[in-house]
């Protein structure tokens, strides 16, 4: 993407009422005004709150929101030029149950209050295979503790990925830490009984992975 296109998207994001771009300082200092107030102040309802972390173009966030208007969905990514597409689609389609946040996932506790979130989706994250990058892996124990803090007691996490490494790493970690694995599947498109919410939405990159013959894996779990 050219720099002119990026700048155009950044500018347009600033005009979208469903896009929030708090500074790092605001989140670190715990001064974000919507923290603990998302459903009351922005969505104006008491519906369950669902996050997509590393949402990319926002296709999954928008797809989930279209399928279930009785839940509120927020996509989070540090790259605003990417989720511009999702934010714009949500505006064009008048989806009032969608928002996007430009922020780093490690600052998530500055965005949401304890027990504020009902579900988390992690879709096609970078597996960060090299050891020195493992601290950025979105299912490592540090991140799991972040999620535990903001999730309700019965909150659920979904991991959908084309990376067998990420799937195996997370599965082993969850088993080792004694967390509750509700569902695990190594190839959701070629095994019967796969949850429809997993196979019913395909992102642009997911279609590419499938065309390449890659298996798409899925985990659903709770943190205890």
Image (cartoon, rainbow, N blue to C red):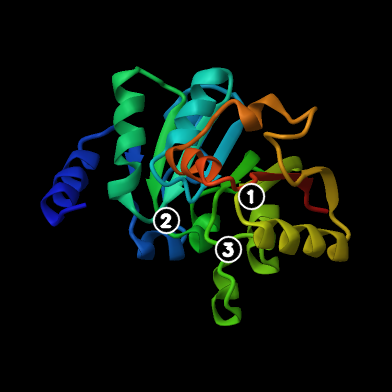
- The image quadrant that residue 79 belongs to is bottom left
Nearest the viewer among 185 and 46 is 185
Q: Name the mark nearer the viewer: 1 or 2.
A: 1
User: Disc 1 vs disc 3: which is toward the camera?
Assistant: 3
Q: Residue furthest left?
A: 4
- Characterize the local packing of mark 3: few (<14), some (14-19) or many (20 or more) Cα atoms within 10 angstroms: many
Picture layout, residue 170 above or below residue 211: below
Which residue occupies 14% across, 56% down? 3
The vertical placement of 26 against 38, above or below, is: below
At which x and y percent is residue 120? 62, 43
Tell which circle, 2 or 3, labels the residue nearer the N-terminal end: 2
- x and y percent of residue 146 in the render? 63, 59
Q: Is residue 29 visible?
A: no
Q: Do the numbered discs 2 and 3 sit on residues whose CB atoms are within 8 Å?
A: no
Q: Within 10 Å of the Cα at label 1, are there few (<14), some (14-19), or many (20+) other Cα atoms?
A: many
**Numbered label attached to residue 150:** 1
Look at mark 3 in the image and give the residue it sits on: 127
The spot of residue 77 in percent (x, y) is 42, 51
Q: Residue at x 49, y 46 (%)?
A: 35
Query: Between disc 1 and disc 2, whose residue precedes?
Result: 2
What distance separates the C-alpha of mark 1 from that of mark 3? 23 Å
Check residue 31 in the rendering and tell me which mark sits there, or answer none.
2
Dot 1 or dot 3, earlier in sequence: 3
Q: Element under label 1?
A: helix
């Amino acid at each position: 993407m050219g720099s002119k296109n990026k700048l155009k998207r950044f500018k347009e994001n600033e005009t979208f009422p469903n896009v929030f771009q708090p500074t790092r300082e605001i989140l670190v200092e715990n001064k974000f005004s919507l923290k603990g107030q998302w459903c009351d102040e922005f969505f104006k309802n008491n519906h369950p709150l669902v996050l997509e972390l590393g949402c990319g173009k926002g296709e999954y966030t928008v797809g989930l929101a279209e399928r279930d208007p009785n839940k509120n969905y927020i996509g989070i990514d540090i790259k605003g030029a990417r989720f511009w597409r999702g934010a714009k689609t949500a505006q064009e389609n008048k989806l009032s149950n969608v928002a996007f946040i430009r922020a780093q996932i490690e600052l998530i506790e500055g965005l949401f209050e304890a027990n504020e979130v009902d579900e988390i989706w992690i879709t096609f994250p970078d597996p960060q295979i090299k050891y020195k990058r493992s601290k950025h892996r979105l299912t490592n124990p540090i991140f799991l503790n972040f999620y535990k803090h903001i999730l309700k007691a019965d909150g659920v996490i979904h991991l959908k990925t084309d990376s067998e490494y990420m799937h195996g790493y997370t599965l082993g970690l969850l088993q080792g830490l004694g967390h509750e694995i509700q569902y695990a599947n190594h190839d959701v498109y070629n095994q019967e009984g796969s949850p429809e919410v997993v196979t019913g939405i395909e992102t642009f990159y997911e279609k590419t992975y499938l065309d390449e013959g890659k298996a798409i894996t899925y985990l659903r779990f709770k943190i205890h």
